[in-house]
Each structure stands twice: as C-alpha cells, then as structure tokens.
Amino acid sequence: MTFDPLRIRSEFPALDQNVNGKPLVYLDSAATSQKPRHVLRALDDYYERDNANVHRGIHELSRRATEGFEEARGKVARWIGASDPAEVIWTSGTTGSINLVASAWGLDNVRAGDEILLSVLEHHSNIVPWQLLARRTGAKLRYVEIDEQGRLILDDLDSLLTDRTKVVAISHVSNALGTVNPVKRIAAAAHARGAVVVVDGAQGAVHTKVDVQDLGVDFYALSGHKMCGPTGSGALWGRRDLLEAMSPYQGGGEMIHFVHRDESTWAELPHKFEAGTPNIAGAIGLGAAVDFLSEIGMDAIQAHERRLMEYALEKVGALDGIRIYGPESLDEHSAVVSFTLGDAHPHDISTILDAEGIAIRAGHHCAQLVMKRYGVSATARASFYLYNTEEDVDRLVEGLGLVVGIFG
Amino acid sequence: MDTPQLNSLYQQLILEHYRNPRNKAELAEKTLEVHLANPVCGDEIRLQLRIEDDRIAAAKFVGSGCSISQAAVSMMTTLLQGRSLADADALAKRFTEMMHGSEEAAKDKALGDLRALRGVSKFPVRIKCALLGFDALQQALEKHPAGDKH
C-alpha cells in the first residue's frame, strides 16, 4: 500500500476545520496526537454496546468488555515485541507508568547512597518521580549531559555508571529536541553494572517500531494519546521476573487474590498492578490505535516523517535569524523542530501562528534542564506526525514570515 | 495580510518597550522584591521596589519572557515612580479591568503607555502574560509591612 498522507489525513476529523478563518495546520502532535475515526469508533462501540466492568461479571456485556480489554493488551504486547501480554500493565500514560516503577520497584530496591542515573534531556515526568524516590530513600541523582546538538554525551557513561547505580532512566526520544537516544547501547552498559533500565517511550513507540527484547531494557513506558489513542490510556511493559518480585503499587479491587483482616495476597500479573476499575475504554481505544498504525506500517510512517523533517529543516532553516536545536543528522532526530527566531519570544511566535490557524507549542516543553543547557527560557516547537504534509511545512514557513514582519 | 487582531496586539510601542525596557536593572536599596514566574510559559520577573513613607520611591525589574510580559512590566514601572501605594493599587485594578475587556478602562489616560496593551484582551491565553508585572506589584503591596492600603 502506498503511503498517502492526504488519505490518512481524511481519517482524522479534527484536522478538517478552520481555525481563525484558516484551514488548521496541526503541528503539536508531540504534545498530543489527533485521533483517527477508527479509534473514535472503537470508543463509541464500547460505550454504546459493551460497557460493563471487566473481570468480575458473569453476564454477556462483562464478557465482551473483558474480551475487548484483554485483546487490546495483547495488541500492545505484540506492538512492542513483548513475549507475554501479562507483562503489559495498563496505566494512565507514561507519567503513571514511571511513577509506578519509581514507587513499586524503587522503594523495595533503592537504598541510601545508591545512585539513579538520568539525563539532562529528560521530560519532567522522568525526573521528578526519581527525585521523590531519592528524597524518600537517600539515593543520589546523577545526570548524563548533552552536547551542543542535544545528543547524550556517552563518552563518560562508564564513569557515570558505578556499582552503586541501581537504575538508569532514559527517554527513547526527546520530546523537546527530537533526539533519538541509543537506548540499546545504554542498556547494555547499564546491565554490565547490574542496573535496571527504565525507558520513557512517550515519544518512542509513536514514531518507530519498538522491540523491547531487542532494546534489552527492563521497563518501557508509553502513552496512548501520543500515538492516536485516547487521553488517559497508556501502558508499562516490564520484565516478568522484575514485575513478579515487585510489591503492588496501589491497593484496591482487582489486584488481590484473597483479603484477610491483616493482610492480603496478590493477584497474578498483570492484575497485581491494576487496582480499581481500569480505563477500559482507553485500553480498547489504544488497541484500536495500534491496529490503525500497524495497518499503515511503522516503517512507512517513519519514512514519511523523515521526508517531512528533511523538507522542514531545509525550509525553516533557511529563515533569517532562525536557530534550530537538536541533532543535525536525521538518523538521530525524530519528528520535532525546536527553534527560536531572532528576538521574537516563542509565545509571540505561537500567538502569531495561531492567528494563521497553525498550532505549535511554545515554552519549556516540560524539559527545563534542556532549556537551561542552551541558556534559553523557551523554544518554539513544531512536531510532525503521519497526517502532516509538505503543505503544512509551507504554511508554517509563511507564518514565520509574518513573525519576521512584526519582529524583524 | 489579513490579521487586524495581530496588528492591534503587536503595536510598535509594545515592541519598542520589549527591545528597550525601561527601569530594567537591579535596584539598590530595595525594600521589597517579588519574584514571579508564569510556569506554563517561562515568563519571569523580579520586581524590586523601594518604598518610603507609603510611596514607591523607585521601581525596577529584571526578567525575561515574551514581548507582552516584558513590555507590560516596563510600562508599569514608568508609571510607578513616586506614586502612593493606594494609587499604585488603583492602577493595578484599572489595568486588570482593561485586560478583561473594559472599554472605559482602555480610554483612561492614567494607564499611559499601558493602553497600547488593550489588544491583549482579545487573546485570552496571553492575558496572564500582560498581568505578570501587576500581579507581582500586588503581591509586593500585600507584603509591605504597613499592610493593607486598600
């Protein structure tokens, strides 16, 4: 099947509208993606036909809801190369997933004096949960620095990893700059020191085929809403032996086997980590998003995004006063163009583009350590996905022309 | 260019204050300082005041951020020099009214250069940028030991 961005675009109802009198150009998919009809229909079908609680009813609706919910788990498992759906735990998203690991695994395994290795590139959701853990345990945080192009400086990885390093938490792809990190290499080095490797995959599974076995990591966190799925859906994949040894994260219904007066026994994986009524519709919607992306093919999506990035870096890069942050090589640079333009502040850029119907993100992108590294308080960020076209890039460049007109 | 709203937002006077901010320096012998940031955007200012006998003897600021936030605080400081605390508070209230769309406030000469910011009221997400300086001022007035001037 040939990749036809216009046909794909027509699957996304929200893209078909005017904003401030102009056709919408949506370049903020790194914040959240738009949703295709296939996913919206799955949500409707669930609520209109199958809505019931899972795993506890004997009746037909509960059976259907449970089946859809567990089928979706299987889809996500296959999507990321997990060997067993029981290793996939539903969460509210990447933030929920990382907090789960930092609490449930962290509190049992990290002690005073131990070290947690992060990078300067991380989103706050892969920093703050570890800071909370460090505060509760007396562990120390260390950071891999980044170079001028926003790439991890791995020359000193061997000295940053010590026998005290208990966990290395690293993003697959940077949300602020688009840097693609060499996760496999980092995981191998971390494992040589006996550290556990946690990957923030919020921007990873979105754009590339992920194989958690091949990456050789221990935990992989992802968000449904960045990959065409519903908000509030997401998953944590973990290696079975680690998940089995962990204490539960939250207590409640669904996660127990037997409850006695003073103690309880835990349900089998994955339910041990799924206290309470889960986001059933979210899981089913995420499963539908996986189907949608699989049918188009991640290789085709990646190739399309690469062509767009090549075009965007050339066109945007040619503007006077532009500075683009992030790796020069497209092998290391995912579908994000993070930039500043002359002395126009990114918020002003964003307001001017919005008046033209163009949605971008301006700010620190929940990555204040990255901003600090470059000595800027904010950047403007245009991010691309499967439904964007070269015409979108042209509109962006025209809009940036207006910015130059006002601020130049 | 079909963007009358944008033109009303980015007036030359705003860009001029953004590029050549008035009173942007550390204030010697300050009696009050308020550090305020807009966490969503990263706009940030430290407003420094020297208050003598219930008057603002001097007002300066340091900070960084978008044109709207930085121009607004620059314009605000030009109006604060020598003003009584009660007057400064009234100015803050007047400006806030203008941000919420009051035509009458937008015509009030007491607002001086700040009137150039009236177009911001049409851009709801940017109103907090324009109010950053006055929010800092109002916090400073509340912190002032002589207390409640309202």
Image (spheres, rainbow, N blue to C red):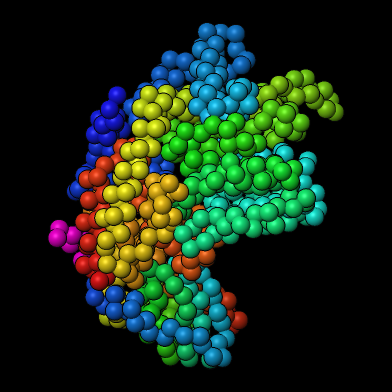
Q: Which residues are magenta?
A: B1-8
- Name the residue furthest right: A262
Res. B136 visible in picture: yes
Q: Position of residue B133 (x, y in %)?
A: 43, 73
Q: Quadrant of residue B31?
A: bottom right
Q: Quadrant of residue B2?
A: bottom left
Res. A358 visible in picture: no
Q: Main secondary structure of the magenta part?
A: helix
Residue at x 61% of width, y 16% of height? A55
Direction from residue A322 to residue A247 in the image, left or right: right
User: Residue A161 in magenta?
Assistant: no
Front residue of B61/A292: it is A292
Direction from residue A357 to residue A212 in the image, left or right: right
Q: Position of residue B150 (x, y in %)?
A: 49, 76
Front residue of B32/A267: it is A267
Q: How many marks?
A: 0
Q: Position of residue A103 (x, y in %)?
A: 70, 42
Direction from residue B21 to residue B109 in the image, left or right: left
Residue at x 63% of width, y 42% of height? A187
Q: Quadrant of residue B67?
A: bottom left
Taking B8 as reference, is A173 above or below it?
A: above
Direction from residue B38 to residue A159 in the image, left or right: right
User: Residue B2 in magenta?
Assistant: yes
Residue at x 31% of width, y 43% of height? A307
